Image: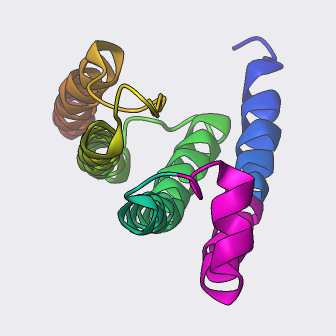
Amino acid sequence: MRHSTALPLAYVFLRILVLLNWIFGACILALLAFTFINESWTMKALGVSGMSDAVQVMWAMRGIAALGIATVPINYQIFKRLLKMVDTVRAGDPFVADNAYRLHAIAWLLVALQLISMTIAGIGRIISTEEHPFHLDAGFSANSWLAIILCFVLARVFAEGTLMREDLEGTV
Protein backbone atom coordinates (compact mmCIF):
# COMPACT_ATOMS: atom_id res chain seq x y z
CA MET A 1 0.00 0.00 0.00
CA ARG A 2 1.29 3.44 -0.88
CA HIS A 3 2.13 5.85 1.89
CA SER A 4 -0.83 8.06 2.67
CA THR A 5 -0.65 11.49 4.26
CA ALA A 6 -4.36 11.31 5.11
CA LEU A 7 -3.89 9.03 8.13
CA PRO A 8 -1.24 11.09 9.93
CA LEU A 9 -3.25 14.23 9.18
CA ALA A 10 -6.44 12.62 10.47
CA TYR A 11 -4.64 11.55 13.64
CA VAL A 12 -3.26 15.06 14.28
CA PHE A 13 -6.59 16.68 13.42
CA LEU A 14 -8.45 14.38 15.81
CA ARG A 15 -5.95 15.09 18.60
CA ILE A 16 -6.47 18.83 18.03
CA LEU A 17 -10.24 18.34 18.13
CA VAL A 18 -9.95 16.48 21.44
CA LEU A 19 -8.06 19.42 22.91
CA LEU A 20 -10.43 22.03 21.46
CA ASN A 21 -13.43 20.04 22.69
CA TRP A 22 -12.18 20.22 26.29
CA ILE A 23 -11.22 23.90 25.96
CA PHE A 24 -14.62 24.88 24.56
CA GLY A 25 -16.33 22.82 27.24
CA ALA A 26 -14.34 24.63 29.94
CA CYS A 27 -15.25 27.99 28.38
CA ILE A 28 -18.96 27.13 28.31
CA LEU A 29 -18.76 25.93 31.92
CA ALA A 30 -17.06 29.19 32.95
CA LEU A 31 -19.72 31.23 31.14
CA LEU A 32 -22.47 29.20 32.76
CA ALA A 33 -20.94 29.73 36.20
CA PHE A 34 -20.63 33.45 35.51
CA THR A 35 -24.36 33.69 34.76
CA PHE A 36 -24.95 32.78 38.40
CA ILE A 37 -22.18 34.99 39.77
CA ASN A 38 -23.26 38.17 37.99
CA GLU A 39 -26.70 37.59 36.51
CA SER A 40 -27.56 41.25 35.88
CA TRP A 41 -24.35 41.90 33.94
CA THR A 42 -24.85 38.69 31.94
CA MET A 43 -28.43 39.66 31.09
CA LYS A 44 -27.24 43.04 29.91
CA ALA A 45 -24.36 41.56 27.89
CA LEU A 46 -26.69 39.08 26.21
CA GLY A 47 -29.25 41.78 25.49
CA VAL A 48 -32.09 40.23 27.47
CA SER A 49 -32.21 42.62 30.44
CA GLY A 50 -35.01 44.71 28.91
CA MET A 51 -37.24 41.75 28.16
CA SER A 52 -40.34 41.16 30.26
CA ASP A 53 -39.42 37.47 30.61
CA ALA A 54 -35.69 38.03 31.08
CA VAL A 55 -35.42 35.61 34.00
CA GLN A 56 -37.02 32.77 32.02
CA VAL A 57 -34.79 33.56 29.05
CA MET A 58 -31.71 33.42 31.28
CA TRP A 59 -32.75 30.03 32.62
CA ALA A 60 -33.33 28.82 29.07
CA MET A 61 -29.87 30.05 28.07
CA ARG A 62 -28.40 28.28 31.08
CA GLY A 63 -30.16 25.12 29.95
CA ILE A 64 -28.67 25.51 26.49
CA ALA A 65 -25.22 26.00 28.03
CA ALA A 66 -25.69 22.91 30.20
CA LEU A 67 -26.65 20.90 27.11
CA GLY A 68 -23.55 22.28 25.40
CA ILE A 69 -21.45 21.03 28.29
CA ALA A 70 -23.16 17.63 28.02
CA THR A 71 -21.88 17.32 24.45
CA VAL A 72 -18.24 17.54 25.54
CA PRO A 73 -17.91 13.97 26.89
CA ILE A 74 -20.01 12.67 23.99
CA ASN A 75 -17.68 14.32 21.49
CA TYR A 76 -14.69 12.97 23.42
CA GLN A 77 -16.05 9.42 23.14
CA ILE A 78 -16.44 9.87 19.38
CA PHE A 79 -12.92 11.28 18.96
CA LYS A 80 -11.42 8.53 21.14
CA ARG A 81 -13.04 5.81 19.05
CA LEU A 82 -12.01 7.48 15.79
CA LEU A 83 -8.41 7.71 17.01
CA LYS A 84 -8.39 4.00 17.79
CA MET A 85 -9.82 3.28 14.35
CA VAL A 86 -7.10 5.37 12.72
CA ASP A 87 -4.54 3.36 14.70
CA THR A 88 -5.92 0.09 13.32
CA VAL A 89 -5.83 1.45 9.76
CA ARG A 90 -2.24 2.64 10.28
CA ALA A 91 -1.38 -0.85 11.52
CA GLY A 92 -2.89 -2.29 8.32
CA ASP A 93 -5.69 -4.17 10.07
CA PRO A 94 -8.91 -2.12 9.94
CA PHE A 95 -11.37 -5.01 9.61
CA VAL A 96 -11.46 -6.04 13.25
CA ALA A 97 -14.50 -6.56 15.42
CA ASP A 98 -13.48 -3.66 17.65
CA ASN A 99 -13.87 -1.22 14.75
CA ALA A 100 -17.37 -2.51 14.04
CA TYR A 101 -18.25 -1.93 17.71
CA ARG A 102 -16.61 1.49 17.61
CA LEU A 103 -18.62 2.56 14.57
CA HIS A 104 -21.82 1.26 16.14
CA ALA A 105 -21.09 3.23 19.32
CA ILE A 106 -20.24 6.34 17.28
CA ALA A 107 -23.60 6.08 15.54
CA TRP A 108 -25.43 6.02 18.89
CA LEU A 109 -23.32 8.91 20.17
CA LEU A 110 -24.26 10.88 17.05
CA VAL A 111 -27.92 10.13 17.78
CA ALA A 112 -27.42 11.62 21.25
CA LEU A 113 -25.78 14.73 19.77
CA GLN A 114 -28.62 15.16 17.28
CA LEU A 115 -31.24 14.82 20.03
CA ILE A 116 -29.41 17.42 22.09
CA SER A 117 -29.30 19.73 19.07
CA MET A 118 -33.04 19.32 18.55
CA THR A 119 -33.64 20.02 22.24
CA ILE A 120 -31.57 23.21 22.01
CA ALA A 121 -33.58 24.29 18.97
CA GLY A 122 -36.79 23.62 20.89
CA ILE A 123 -35.62 25.78 23.78
CA GLY A 124 -34.72 28.50 21.30
CA ARG A 125 -38.19 28.37 19.78
CA ILE A 126 -39.82 28.55 23.20
CA ILE A 127 -37.96 31.71 24.23
CA SER A 128 -38.03 33.39 20.84
CA THR A 129 -40.54 36.18 20.27
CA GLU A 130 -41.17 38.56 17.40
CA GLU A 131 -39.75 41.33 19.57
CA HIS A 132 -36.65 39.35 20.53
CA PRO A 133 -36.00 36.52 18.07
CA PHE A 134 -33.39 33.91 18.92
CA HIS A 135 -31.59 32.29 16.01
CA LEU A 136 -29.68 29.22 17.06
CA ASP A 137 -27.67 26.98 14.78
CA ALA A 138 -29.33 23.87 16.12
CA GLY A 139 -32.16 21.51 15.36
CA PHE A 140 -32.98 18.73 12.96
CA SER A 141 -30.24 18.12 10.42
CA ALA A 142 -30.82 15.81 7.49
CA ASN A 143 -27.03 15.58 7.02
CA SER A 144 -26.55 14.51 10.63
CA TRP A 145 -29.17 11.79 10.34
CA LEU A 146 -27.60 10.66 7.06
CA ALA A 147 -24.22 10.42 8.85
CA ILE A 148 -25.88 8.40 11.62
CA ILE A 149 -27.36 5.95 9.12
CA LEU A 150 -24.01 5.76 7.35
CA CYS A 151 -22.24 4.90 10.63
CA PHE A 152 -24.74 2.14 11.41
CA VAL A 153 -24.32 0.71 7.89
CA LEU A 154 -20.51 0.95 8.04
CA ALA A 155 -20.53 -0.75 11.42
CA ARG A 156 -22.36 -3.65 9.84
CA VAL A 157 -19.96 -3.63 6.85
CA PHE A 158 -17.00 -3.80 9.23
CA ALA A 159 -18.63 -6.63 11.18
CA GLU A 160 -19.27 -8.59 7.97
CA GLY A 161 -15.75 -7.82 6.70
CA THR A 162 -14.34 -9.16 9.95
CA LEU A 163 -16.38 -12.36 9.67
CA MET A 164 -15.40 -12.83 6.02
CA ARG A 165 -11.72 -12.39 6.87
CA GLU A 166 -11.98 -14.87 9.73
CA ASP A 167 -13.71 -17.39 7.44
CA LEU A 168 -11.04 -16.89 4.79
CA GLU A 169 -8.24 -17.37 7.33
CA GLY A 170 -9.96 -20.51 8.57
CA THR A 171 -10.02 -22.08 5.12
CA VAL A 172 -6.35 -21.39 4.34
Rendered residue at 74%/70% (across/down): 41
The overriding secondary structure of the stretch rendered in magenta is: helix
For this rendering, which residue is in front, 21 or 95?
A: 21
Q: Using residue 14 as the reference point, say whether residue 156 is left or right of it.
A: left
Among the 4 quarters of the image, the one containing residue 53: bottom left
Residue 48 location (% of width, % of height)? 56, 52
Q: Residue furthest bottom?
A: 37
* Image quarter hosting the N terminus: top right
Q: Using residue 86 as the reference point, say whether residue 101 is left or right of it.
A: left
Q: Using residue 47 as the reference point, say whether residue 140 is left or right of it.
A: left
Asked whether the viewer can see residue 144, the reply is yes
Q: Based on the picture, tell me whether residue 49 belongs to the magenta stretch.
A: yes
Q: Using residue 61 as the reference point, say whether residue 87 is left or right of it.
A: right
Residue 140 location (% of width, % of height)? 26, 26
Residue 150 location (% of width, % of height)? 27, 21
Asked whether the viewer can see residue 26, the reply is no
Residue 87 location (% of width, % of height)? 63, 47
Rendered residue at 76%/11% (across/down): 2
Rendered residue at 51%/62% (across/down): 65
Q: Based on the picture, tell me whether residue 47 belongs to the magenta stretch.
A: yes
44 relative to 17, above or below? below
For this rendering, which residue is in front, 137 or 10?
A: 137
* Image quarter hosting the C terminus: top left
For this rendering, which residue is in front, 12 or 18?
A: 18
In the rendered structure, which segment of residues is drawn in magenta? 21-50
For this rendering, which residue is in front, 143 or 155?
A: 143
